[in-house]
Amino acid sequence: DSLDVTKLVISSSKCEIHILKEDGDTFHLVERLPVANKEAGILWLKDHGFKNIVELKMVHNDFEFDKGIVGLYEINDKLKSVILDYPKDKLQSIEKILSLENAEVIEIPYNNYLQQ
């Protein structure tokens, strides 16, 4: 079962479809498709077989730290999360440095997590 992700990203300057492929422990953006607006993006998703579309408001900032990336995310104005983009063998030490060792670990994309 693949954890690949396809999402419509809307910002103040653009609307795009982002296609991410899972590769081991990370996701890589493999395609970025411009769309005219939110409605065109939803139509694109439906035309490509997506039936269950979940709308999320996501605000994030990424920071480089210790040869990796720490992403601070806020989902739908309430779910706050930290995404650590590090090799699996380095995660435990980074979690300890950032005092995250007791935090809930989510290892699947948010759309799958929210549907559980």
Image (cartoon, rainbow, N blue to C red):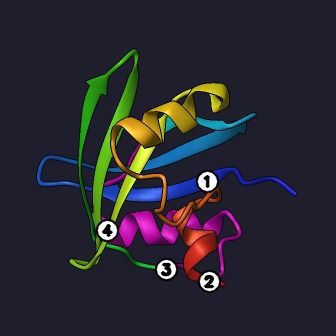
Q: State the residue at coordinates (59%, 59%).
A: 109
Q: Which residues are magenta?
A: 33-53
Question: Residue 33's x, y, as percent?
Answer: 45, 41
The amino acid at mark 3 is Val
What residue is shown with label 4? Answer: 38
What residue is shown with label 2? Answer: 115
Q: Upstream in the sequence, badge 4 or badge 3?
A: 4
Find out whether the residues at labels 4 and 3 contact each other: C-beta distance under 8 Å.
Answer: no
Q: Upstream in the sequence, badge 2 or badge 1?
A: 1
Q: Residues within 10 Å of mark 2 (few under 14, many from 20)?
A: few
Q: Which labelled disc corresponds to residue 5?
A: 1
Quarter location, residue 114: bottom right
The amino acid at mark 4 is Lys
The amino acid at mark 2 is Gln
Q: Which labelled disc corresponds to residue 54?
A: 3
Q: State the residue at coordinates (35%, 55%).
A: 9
Q: Considering the numbered disc 3 on the image, is that residue within a helix, a strand or a loop?
A: loop
